[in-house]
Image (cartoon, rainbow, N blue to C red):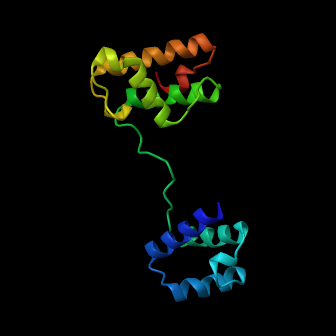
Amino acid sequence: MTQSLRKLIFVGCRELGIDTDTRKALQLQLVGKESLSDMDEQELRTIKDHLVQQGFKPASKGRYKPAPRKDLRLVHVLWAKLGAAGELDNPTRKGLNAFVRRKFGDAWGSVPVDVDQLRDHKQIDAVLQALIAWARRAGVEIDWERIGK
């Protein structure tokens, strides 16, 4: 974790236009240490939090933009619900894409690399129906009011 925090600090400084000398002076002022290598995780977080206060907006690692269509976003919601219920070996986006390939690859002939690239409403509906059926079999509660359906 400390290595990723160090990298994040370097990115933040670069984005904010903070040069090496200024960064080291800032670190010395905030935690009493000039070198990131000498800092523990809490001290690194202090530096990162300061950069955030200065306007740095770290990208969330592994995050994707929301799906381009509401029905595709629902696919992700259902997959997350199944993951939270412990029904999935791989509750990640990679796992969802593997599920779509495994379940529909032969029937469709070709499957996009990422589920968000689906555009055929019949294919999207087939994925939704498969996930809904799985959730029902597993006893996963789906609050349709909250989801917006």
- Above/below status of 79 relative to 22: above
Q: Is residue 40 left or right of residue 95?
A: right
Give residue 27's position: percent from left, percent from top.
64, 81
Residue 108 visible in this rendered orientation of the protein: yes
Q: Quadrant of residue 124?
A: top left
Give residue 16's position: percent from left, percent from top.
46, 75
Q: Quadrant of residue 3?
A: bottom right
Residue 122 visible in this rendered orientation of the protein: no
Q: Quadrant of residue 142?
A: top right
Give residue 72's position: percent from left, percent from top.
39, 29
Residue shown at 31% from the left, 31% from the top: 112
Residue shown at 37% from the left, 18% from the top: 104
Give residue 108's position: percent from left, percent from top.
29, 18
Q: Is residue 139 left or right of residue 40?
A: left
How many tags in the picture? 0
Q: Is residue 22 left or right of residue 67?
A: right
Residue shown at 61% from the left, 72% from the top: 50
Residue shown at 44% from the left, 72% from the top: 15
Q: Is residue 43 left or right of residue 137?
A: right
Q: The N terminus appears in which quarter of the rendering?
A: bottom right
Q: Nearer the viewer, residue 7 or 49?
A: 7
- Above/below status of 15 relative to 140: below
